[in-house]
Image (cartoon, grey):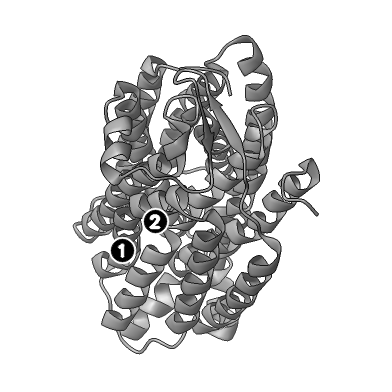
Amino acid sequence: MKNNTKAYAWVVVALLWVVAFLNYFDRILITSMRDPIVAEFGLTDAQFGLLTSVFLWSYGFVSPLGGYLADKYSRKKVIVLSVAIWSLVTLWTGYTTSFSEMLATRLLMGISEACYIPAALALITDYHSGKTRPLATGLHMCGLYPGLALGGLGGFIAEYWGWRAGFHVFGAFGVLYALVLVYFLKDANVKIENKEEGETIVTEGGSYSIREVLSSLFKLPSFYIILIFFAVLGMANWLVNGWLPTFLKDQFQLDLGTAGISATGYIQIGSFIGVILGGIIADRWVQKNPKGRLNVMIIGFCIGAPFLFVMASTHMFFLAILAMVIFGLARGFNDANLMPMLRQVVDQRYIATAYGFLNFLSTIVGGLMVYVGGALKDANVSLSITYQVIAVILLIVSLTLSRVKIKHIN
């Protein structure tokens, strides 16, 4: 099968859907296993939060480099190495014997996982044109949601088989799947017409330097706006990912397993709907208005951010469920459209690097907020207050996206 056929373009999405699932499942599994891990290692809430923060900080710092390697060399090789290494680290996590060793595994997991998303989204958007980009990107991002949702099963796994079992099983599966990717995944050899510069760009590698990449990206005011937006979104997302099981357990007196699956499941249901619906709406809207994808993202969080505030404020569990679904819907709108929209703003030769910088800032501040959330909880500051504050900030920065300058429809 030729790797430039329309059929293979969807095979790529299917292959990477599984990787997207593992990418988020492996990283989030630990958050729903708080009680047994804290008990075994004698941790404070701040120390437990640090396990996620260390992952995010290492993930963030390496993301731009991972994106640069995917732009300059082979997207396939970056993806395969990333999957293989983080799966081995996941396997190792199940054998850790101390808090410091667990910190080391989270550090290495962050480094290895950082290279995947920029390379994967770049590869998918290499294969898919403007007409199918939002849907293809959205379908790939759908893999993240089951990963997040089933990561909440960690509480049940810990209760019935011990917290180490999940790391053993899914780490081994990831190593085997990396071998599948070696055989079936192929780099695209797609030529992109740069209408503004009047040149043709081949996506497999390039002779440009890091200085050229940085100069191209950071001369754009719109790129700074997107960076700030994605940073705040990262703060909100990782406060949700890192502390929502604990918040629901305390707020609604749930058991560990129910709190874990509720914290991940309802938001991911909304996200799954949002990523498909957001891709379809944006695909149609962008044919009439170049800012169609951007507008879908703005509308999503103008609705979703207030419902995050509602979730943090209510003592009625059914209302919290509704709020989580709607916030998830907004996240889906964003996930389907961020990469296609970014390709309308930055030089397409540097698209993986650009996304890497978004991941860099988002995860650094996201990791900081996970730690701060734990520290504030130790100081008897309710998680509901933390969620309320971040919801207000997210609404404000979402509105600033209207100032992003779109260059073209692609």
The quadrant the C terminus occupies is top right
- Tell which of 127 and 278 is nearer to you: 127
365 to the left or right of 19: left
Residue 18, horizontal then vertical, whole percent: 65, 60
Q: Which mark is residue 49?
A: 1
Where, by quadrant of the figure, is residue 99 drawn? bottom left
- Tell which of 409 and 273 is nearer to you: 409
Does residue 57 sit above or below 205 in this rendering?
Answer: below
Does residue 361 sit above or below 247 in this rendering?
Answer: above
Q: Which mark is residue 38?
A: none
In this figure, which residue is indicated by the disc labeled 2? 243
Where, by quadrant of the figure, is residue 312 drawn? top left
Q: Secondary structure at mark 1?
A: helix
Does residue 360 sit above or below 288 in this rendering?
Answer: below
Residue at 32% of width from left, 31% of height from top? 216
Does residue 155 appear in this view?
Answer: yes
Residue at 27% of width from left, 33% of height from top? 215
Q: Amino acid at mark 1?
A: Gly
